[in-house]
Image (cartoon, rainbow, N blue to C red):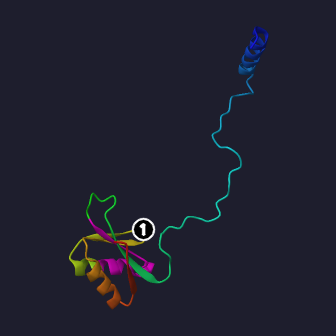
Amino acid sequence: MSKIKLRLANSQITAMSHDNNSRLVYSTDGGIIKEQTQSPSASPFPADGVVRIRRETKGRKGAGVISIHGVPAEQQKAIATLLKKKCGTGGGLKEGIIEIQGDKRDLIKAELEKAGFSVKLVGG
């Protein structure tokens, strides 16, 4: 680049920096922002009336927990209390999911079927 063009470019930069109404803007977005076609569902399981029992160890330092999805909201607290008593373990109710400590899937399945739910064992 010649010295004349360089001086011109530098003078434009300094002139722009003294203007109070202009500022430098940087954006990482490229192009048009797309609208989401589907909203992300709260639960990975469908609401089809089937209670799903899954054993989880992720994020629990290796401790096994049974998570129960698909129990109607008005019965969740009563079912959680019943299952904790029958299994003799602790547990809780978090965001509509019943969690029972330990690996007692067969006992939990039998109790839920006795209560009139259709039950599926999910995962390993």
Observer-nearest of 99 and 19: 99
Image quadrant containing the C terminus = bottom left
| x and y, in percent, of residue 108 in the image | 29, 81
| x and y, in percent, of residue 23 in the image | 70, 28
Please count the marks in the image: 1
Q: Would residue 40 be found to the left or right of residue 77 on screen?
A: right
Q: Would residue 25 be found to the left or right of residue 115 on screen?
A: right
The quarter holding residue 118 reads bottom left
The residue furthest top is 3
Q: Secondary structure at mark 1?
A: loop
Observer-nearest of 15 and 62: 62
Return the residue at label 1: 95
The residue furthest left is 88
79 magenta-colored? yes
Q: Would residue 41 be found to the left or right of residue 112 on screen?
A: right
88 magenta-colored? no
Give neighbour class at mark 1: few <14, some 14-19, many 20+ (Cα, 10 Å): few
Q: Which residues are magenta?
A: 64-82
- Name the residue located 53 percent from the left edge and 67 percent from the top edge: 41
Query: Is 5 rendered above or below residue 95?
Result: above
Image quadrant containing the N terminus = top right
| x and y, in percent, of residue 94 in the image | 38, 67
Query: Is 1 rendered above or below residue 46?
Result: above
Observer-nearest of 75 and 87: 87
Query: Is 27 rendered above or below residue 12?
Result: below
Type of amino acid under label 1:
Glu
The quarter holding residue 54 reads bottom left
- Name the residue located 26 percent from the left edge and 82 percent from the top edge: 107
